Structures are given as C-alpha cells and as structure tokens.
Image (cartoon, rainbow, N blue to C red):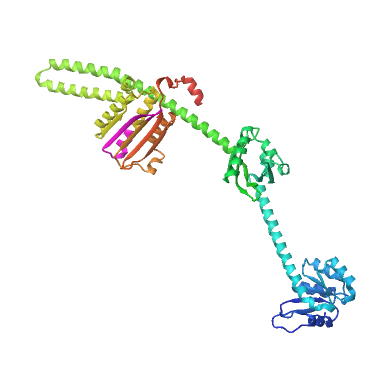
Amino acid sequence: MLTTTTPTKDPALRLLVVCNTAALTDRLAEGWDDEGPAPVFVAAAGAAPLRGMLREERWDAVLHCLNHAACSPSTTLKTLRDRSLDTPLIIVAEPGDQRAAIKALRAGAHDVVFFDRLNQLAPAVAREIREAGHRADHRAALEMLHDSEARFRALASNLPGLVFNLQRETSGKYRFLYVSEGSLRLLGVKHHELRGTAQRFFDALFAEDRQRLLTTLEESALSGTTLFWEGRLKSGDRWIDMRSLPHRNDEGTVLWTGIATDISQAKNTEAALRESRAQLAALSSHLEAAKEEERERIARDIHDELGSILVRLKIEAALLASKLPADLIPKAHSIEKLLDQAMGTASRVARQLRPGILKEFGLPAAIECQAEDFGHSTGITCRAQCDEGIELDADTSLALFRIVQEALTNVAKHAHASLVVVRLRSETGNIALEIRDNGRGISERDMDKPRSFGLRGIRERVQSLNGGFHIATAEQGGTLLILKVPTRLGDDAVPSEHEETIQQDLF
C-alpha cells in the first residue's frame, strides 16, 4: 500500500485511489483544480488493500486508475458491491484508453476523467458525491415508505374491519383504489376482487340499504361532510358500519379513505335491549293495572263494607246516647265525633286509592279534589287550575292523576315548599300538565339517584302514553315538572287484553 498526502489543516474530502504507484496520487493532487480545501489522496495498490481500507474507514469517493492498478475496474466494483457501499467510483484513464473507460462505465462506474483533463476531476468528484447523497436520501425515503406501508398493512390486517380507498369519478362511477384483507372476513369477497370496482361491494348489500348508501355518498361528495352509514348484507344477518371523510382533488374526483366494520353484535345487542325494554314496559303496565285493580277492590271494601259499618256504629251510638244518663252523654258525643273522623278518614283513603270522582266527573275535578285533600293533610297551599272541556280516556286520566299524586307526595317529602300550583291545559292534539312549587328545587344529582323511584314511576307512566317529560329547577326557584301526552278520547283507548294474553307477551 502506497500513501501520499497533501498537507492541509481541514481536508474536505478523503479519496481512495486504486493505483500501483504513489506518483499517480501526486499527479492527481497536482491536477486537482478547486478553490476549496485540497482533498486527501490515499493509494491502494490492489484488491486486498482496497478491501482492508474500505473496511476500516469511510471514503468520499474511489478513483480507479485504469491500467495503472493491480486489479481491474470490475474487481473494484465487485468489492464495493460486496460491502453494500454506494461510494462513487470514478475511472481515471489515459487518453488512449477510451474504449476500456467506456466498458468500465457500462459495468457500473459513475464517471470517467482522462489524465490530460484532470481539471475536470474536482467537478466530477463533487457531482458524483452529490448524486450519491441524493441516492442515499432516496433509499432512506424508500425504506421509510416501505416501513410505513408495512406498519399500515399490519394495522389494516389486524383491524376488525375493512380499510378502503373508495374513489368516485366525475362520471359518477365508483371504484376501490385499495381494499384491505379484512374484506374476506367482512364480505366473504377477496380484496383483489374488489379492487378497481365497487360493484361487487354494492351487490353484496341489501337493496334498500344499498340505495341509501349511494344517496349518502352523493350527499357526502357534494357537501364534504363525513360519511356515516349503516346497512345490512343481502343475507340480512350481518350489519356494516362505514365511516370516512371525503377529499376532492383538482380533477373533480372524490376519494373516501375510511373503515367498514362489522356491527352485527352491537345491532343484535341493541335489538335484544329494545325487546327487553319493551318487555319491562309491558310488565310495568301489567303491574300498574294489577295495582289499580287491587286499589279499586280495597277502596270498594273500605267504602262499602267499612263505611257501612261506621255508619251503623254512628246510628247505634246516637240511639245509645239518647238513652244514657246525663253524665254519660258527653262521652257518647265524643264517640260520635271519633266515628265522624273515622268516616272522613275512610272516605279520604278510598278516594286516594281509587277516586270515584275521576270516573264520575273527569280528570279536572279529580285533580282539584286531590289538591284540596293535599292542602288539608299537609298544610301546604295547593292550587289547581284546569281547562274546561278536557275529556280523556280512562287509562290516560288515571295515569295523569297518579302522576299528580306522586308529584305532590314528592313535594311534601322533599321540597320544603309553602305553595304548589297544578296546571292542566289542553293544546292542539296534546294534554299538558305542569306542577310547580316554591321549594328548594331539584339538582341533577337528585334526578340521577339510583333509588329515585318516584321520578322513575312518573317517567314510565309518561312513556307508556307516548308523551314527553321534563323536570328542572324553575327560574324563580323551586321545581318545575312539565309533561305532555297525546290526547286520546274514550274510543281511541286500546282495549285491555286478557290476563293470559298479557302474560304470554311478558314471558
């Protein structure tokens, strides 16, 4: 190995020269024509020294002196390739070796500089180093792209769905630019069968849902809004959810990049939940009907049997008082007063259990009577304002009356109010009921309590009537309850079902 160096404080380049004499490196150094720092020329006499120096150090370029080295250009190229080096290889040849130089270029050398034009060596080296840097950047970018594609494909293949690129041409035709392997699990169609066309995908959908998807795609393309669509496959046992954001390019085509997932389990769970809620609602209605029947029976027993017994006791007490000595008459009158109180209590309990006034005179009269009883029993002023001419079916009247009862009970227990106003009014096609108090109000925490059975009972009753329910703190303080239910006349009421039929529906 022969080595010569050109003295420099800050060498810009390190050039490895494949030659068999140090005189050639001096000749190259003398012919170097560049304003920058002079490079360091290091000579390698043959293939073995070349391999050792490439292994030990990094070089900016390799200069192969044609016909002045112990190895051929092809050997130098093979040595560089064996070490996976993209170091620029420049052939330096005598003017008469043009044919051999061209052969070396065809074999893979990057450039040729002749000894009689060594002033071109510096620009050639700079250019090839720059090109090598570009190639390195390109390889790094490709590696990053390949890594990114590998990560994307790994992610797409492990997602529980189908990742897609769906393009809509200006003609309105759809085609898939990319489809992940999840298409086989989701649709039963291989991903390469969907690429280039979307018809296989559309054909796999239920006809009604397919048309809705096309309409949704059209709206998303025109407005630029996110695509949200749910639909069924032709088999009807699987549901698909598609989500994507559209992108429009300058040519007018629209591209959706998104994911389609299997939501069959969620849909089945949702259907089961709806069925369960329907069964619970039917059970609740059945229990309420049973409770009302029991209340009516108890109220009838209190009114008919207990009431008649109390009346007979009062008559007997009056007859007995007329025959008692004068000193016992006050005691007899005291017994008569107690019997009057018992008769009043029995009458009030019977009205609360099943108000006869509700059947005889309607809901407004029953609410006014309930407000009066509430005021007497609690000491809280209760005012009832009801529109005239309100006629409802028995079920709606009873449900609204029970709601008023439950609301007034809550006021007595929790509101610490001194005034309650009940407002019943008729609207177009609806009956509106408002109950307002001037108490401490109600908070979100109170409404979300797990054991708020009173409010839950009111909500269940309103839902059974297909109505709406709202409760909040009033603007002037206190609590405001508002509900609206559709007006149903007596002929519109649904006839009660037989007990056995109800139980079959429930169980």
Residue 387 appears in the figure: yes
Residue shown at 41% from the left, 39% from the top: 450
- In the image, residue 106 above or below residue 426: below
Residue 59 appears in the figure: no
- In the image, residue 325 above or below residue 234: above
Q: In this view, does 319 lie to the left or right of 266?
A: left
- In the image, residue 163 above or below residue 91: above
Q: In this view, does 42 lie to the left or right of 280?
A: right
Q: Nearer the viewer, residue 107 or 276?
A: 107
Q: Name the spot of residue 335 as percent of width and height, x first.
A: 18, 22
Q: Is residue 280 left or right of residue 439?
A: right
| Identity of the residue furthest to the bottom in this view | 7
Q: Name the spot of residue 412 as percent of width and height, x first.
A: 30, 36
Q: Name the spot of residue 177 as percent of width and height, x first.
A: 69, 47
Quarter of the image with the N terminus in it:
bottom right
Q: Give the range drawn in magenta.
A: 407-431
Q: Name the spot of residue 113 as percent of width and height, x first.
A: 82, 74
Q: Tell me which corner region of the image, top left, top right, bottom left or bottom right, holds residue 289.
A: top left
Q: Is residue 419 magenta?
A: yes
Residue shown at 74% from the left, 80% from the top: 38
